[in-house]
Amino acid sequence: MLRVPTRETTTTRRPARLRGFARAVLLLALPMSLGACGYNTIQTYDEAAASAQRNIEVQLQRRADLIPNLVETVKGFAAQESEVLTQVTEARAGLQGALSRTGGADMSELAAANAGLTSALGRLSVVVEAYPDLKSNENFLRLQDELTGTENRIAVSRTDYNGAVETYNAYIRRFPAVLTAKVTGAKAREYFEADAGAREAPKVDFSK
């Protein structure tokens, strides 16, 4: 039997349809509002900086991993240079500590620890000058090449990271993203620099 919709049935269905339409509009409007307030862009820039930070940490860990073999190799030719070797070992421990910091690495701490290791290796390179046999040792030369390559990769990673941080920090200061940053707790990231003027990667050259 064919049923003819009554006024009551039609009236009952209409609010349900309107509610469904309103929900659809809200679902479509949400991404647009998030994009307009800069939320999505903040997340994208923050993840880019985080990824670049991980690259730095990988290269710093690689540098730290090379130090024990370097110290042992030098010790085989210059055991009497214990003071300098101890300084290198302690500086390496400082870098390791910064890398394994509870709650995540602090970039200023990492940069300072890395600069400390560079300084200690610089003192070691002066010592190496007095030992021609050490300078020509095959294992020492290999470690020297690996350290140099790692320093170059650190320099590239630092440039990439600082560029990503600059983009992110500049964006969260702009309107309306600055409002979104305050609401979501997005904070400016630190640059990877030992000090405000440290823009070039320090070099450690054992071949002088």
Image (cartoon, rainbow, N blue to C red):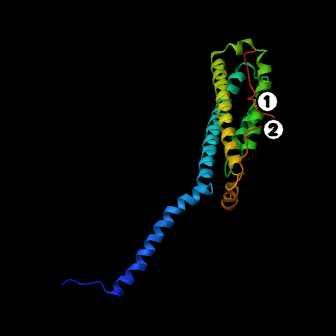
Q: Which residue is mark 1?
A: 119
Q: Residue at x 67, y 32 (%)?
A: 154
Spot occupied by residue 188 in the image (x, y as percentages of width and height): 72, 50
The picture quadrant where one finds residue 178 is: bottom right
User: Callout 1: helix, strand or loop?
Assistant: helix
What amino acid does circle 1 point to?
Ser
Q: From the top left corner, tell me how far across and down residue 111 is, in percent.
A: 74, 38
Q: What secondary structure is found at the residue carrying circle 2?
A: loop
User: What's the mark number on residue 190?
Assistant: none
User: For this view, does 131 lie left or right of residue 161?
Assistant: right
Q: CA distance from mark 1 to mark 2?
A: 18 Å
Label 1, residues with CA under 10 Å away: few <14, some 14-19, many ≥20:
some
Q: Nearer the viewer, mark 1 or mark 2?
A: 2
Q: Nearer the viewer, residue 14 or 118?
A: 14
| Residue 47 vertical position relative to residue 152 in the rendered view, above or below | below
**Residue 97 rendering spot, x and y as whole percentages:** 71, 43
The quadrant of the rendering that contains the N terminus is bottom left
Q: Quadrant of the C terminus?
A: top right
Above-or-below relation of 193 to 120: below
Say if 52 sits above or below 67 in the image: below
Q: Quickly name the residue at label 2.
A: 196
Residue 69 visible in the picture: no
Foreground of the two, 85 or 38: 38
State the residue at coordinates (79%, 32%).
87
How many residues crowd around disc 2 within 10 Å: few (fewer than 14), some, or many (20 or more)? few
Task: Kindly identify the amino acid type of the residue bearing the numbered disc 2.
Answer: Ala
